[in-house]
Amino acid sequence: MRSSVPGAPKGARALASEVIGAVAVDYSYRSTHRLRETDDFSSVFAFRKVLRGAYLHLLYRPNQGTTARLGMIVAKKFIARATSRNLVKRLGREAFRGLRSELPPCDLILRVAAPIAMPIDRKVLRREIDTLLLRVPK
């Protein structure tokens, strides 16, 4: 994904990983950053470490990789409308992309644990996701 670089000449483009100071920060969300296999999800559930928020739970388990990986469970039981479920997933992915470089190498599952009132307040939900991600033990 390409984006404009603030302060660069008009029309200049940069990759999603930009240089900040002397350290390159990668904001991508590749397949290597996702939990996909049933066994991966099962191992995180079996580890039984959970951070709880008002609407969301963040389950975590250290992994042997070099980066954090994210999986999401957004049940129809708690959020009936597909557009709202997609919004929660999008907010989770965006928060993870921005904070991935600060997270320890672990597998994370972001799960909706309580009904969320309609319409969803994006700021409250994003703040809760950010708070949960930053509470993961290093």
Image (tube, rainbow, N blue to C red):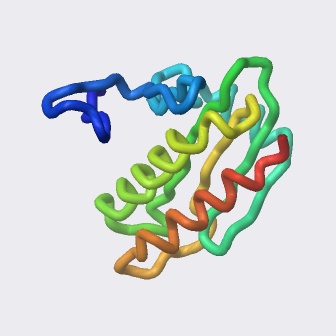
Which residue occupies 65% across, 74% down? 54
**Of the pair 81 and 95, the residue shown nearer to us:** 95
**Of the pair 73 and 22, the residue shown nearer to us:** 22
Looking at the rendering, in which quadrant would you find the N terminus?
Answer: top left
Which residue occupies 48% across, 26% down? 19
Which residue occupies 50% across, 39% down? 97
Could you tell whether 93 is left or right of 101 in the image?
A: left
Q: Is residue 38 above or below residue 94?
A: above
Residue 75 placement (x, y as % from top left): 50, 58
Which residue occupies 55% across, 49% down? 73
Quarter of the image where one finds residue 41? top right
Residue 91 placement (x, y as % from top left): 44, 54
Number of numbered discs visible in the structure rendering = 0
Residue 36 visible in the displayed image: no
**Of the pair 2 and 72, the residue shown nearer to us:** 2
Residue 53 placement (x, y as % from top left): 69, 68
Residue 2 visible in the displayed image: yes
Could you tell whether 67 is left or right of 84 in the image?
A: right
Q: Is residue 59 above or below residue 75?
A: above
Q: Find the residue positioned furthest to the left.
A: 11
Residue 100 placement (x, y as % from top left): 60, 37
Looking at the rendering, in which quadrant would you find the C terminus?
Answer: top right
Quarter of the image where one finds residue 66? top right
**Of the pair 5 and 42, the residue shown nearer to us:** 5
